Every structure is written in C-alpha cells, then in structure tokens.
Image (cartoon, coloured by chain):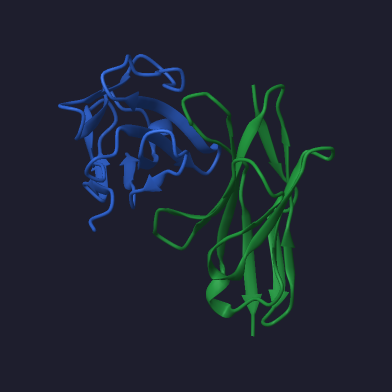
Chain colours: A green, B blue
Amino acid sequence: AQSVTQLDSQVPVFEEAPVELRCNYSSSVSVYLFWYVQYPNQGLQLLLKYLSGSTLVKGINGFEAEFNKSQTSFHLRKPSVHISDTAEYFCAVSASGNTGKLIFGQGTTLQVKP
Amino acid sequence: GAGVSQSPSNKVTEKGKDVELRCDPISGHTALYWYRQSLGQGLEFLIYFQGNSAPDKSGLPSDRFSAERTGGSVSTLTIQRTQQEDSAVYLCASSPDRTYEQYFGPGTRLTVT
C-alpha cells in the first residue's frame, strides 16, 4: 500500500518570495508522483507529474518538483510566488502498472501575502 | 475542448434519502475515477472504471455506495439511505488510457441534513 505525507498544513509566504511545499511518500513498489492544485470551489488541476526519467520535473505556472528516491520525497518549489498562487496543493502517488488510482496527501494551503 | 462535467453542482438531501451524482468524462477517455473530499478524511479514492473491465470498487466505504458507467461514457454514483457522514464533495476524473494524467471535474457538494 502507498501513503503520502504533506508535512505542512499551511504555508504563509510573501509575494515574490520562494516557496517549498514538502511531500514524502511510502510505498513498497515503484510509484508515479503528482502535484495537483485546487483553487477555491474548483476541481483539481494537475501541476506536474513524475513517471520516469529526469528527477527534476517542470510544471505549469513556474512550479517544479524533484523526485528523490532515497529520501522518498517529491517536494514542490517555486522561485517567486504571486498572489494568484494562493490555493490548496495536493501531493499524490499511484502505484506504477496499477489502475492509476491516486492516493493523496492531506493538502497544504499556500497563503501568499502582499 | 469540453472538460469533465458533473451534476448537480450542489445537492442537499435529508438523511435516509437516496441520491444520484452524475459524471460526464472527456470524450474518448477510457478511464474514469470517483473520489470523495471531506474535511475529516481528505481526498479518498472510491471507484475506478476502465473500458469493459470489471470496476475496482476497493474504495467504496459501504454497500450503500454503488456506481455504474454506461456505454463506456457517463457514470452515475448512487448513495442509498444517506447518512450525515456522507456529506462531502464528490469528484470525478477521467484519463486517457495509460497516461496516468487525470482530469478532474468541478465536483458535486453533497450535504445531508
């Protein structure tokens, strides 16, 4: 079975500052890793995904994440945030070769302050 | 193109009543998923459909929950004898086969009073 831990429930940050949202996972099999963003009263939107290959993954809106197999982490980063990045962010895993069903972390609320 | 759509967007029902939630996936997507998002449990997988294969029902919380997918397209999630703990946002997602990229609908907010 897989599990995901997002280490911070809320991350406040000032506009134009860098941010890192932390995600650790646990799995006995190879996994695929994802970050989703959810704006208020909306569904989930995929930011980026890691399936294989380069461990540094670039996504939409200037976000990137690095897969670290030894530390079982997939932290999300952005060098300079905007007010519009205020949202809830979810890290998720799915077992490779499986149905693709996602196991989500509890979410991190990113609060960007002016 | 059109994304995943869900209806209704909001549903208020009395405890003990049955409800049906509908999902229209993106045309051509063979995989369809249902998830539930609640304050206490976060985002949970409920059920998965892939083509004509038997669905993966491993996430359904009780036998009051069922789902079907007709003609490989539209899906309906049915909750019988609703309970207050069923109050949540129910999200549907669809995916092209084997890309592992899921596209989510806006969700149905279910409130059981």
Location of residue A73 in the rendering, given as x and y in whole percent from the top left corner: 76, 44
Q: Which of A63 and B34 is in front in this view?
A: A63
Location of residue B58 in the rendering, given as x and y in whole percent from the top left corner: 45, 17
B50 sits left or right of A90 in the view? left
Question: At 59% from the left edge and 41% from the top edge, which residue is drawn?
Answer: A51
Q: Splitting the image into 4 quarters, where does residue A19 fall?
A: bottom right
Q: Splitting the image into 4 quarters, where does residue B82 fall?
A: top left
Seen in the picture, residue A60 relative to B30 is either above or below; the reply is below
Seen in the picture, residue A60 relative to A97 is either above or below; the reply is below
Seen in the picture, residue A95 relative to A60 is either above or below; the reply is above
The extreme front residue here reads A53
Question: At 29% from the left edge and 39% from the top edge, which residue is drawn?
Answer: B29
Question: At 33% from the left edge and 49% from the top edge, which residue is drawn?
Answer: B105
B15 sits left or right of A75 in the view? left
Q: Nearer the viewer, residue B39 or A37?
A: A37
Location of residue B15 in the rendering, given as x and y in whole percent from the top left corner: 29, 30
Q: In which quarter of the image is the N terminus of chain B?
A: bottom left
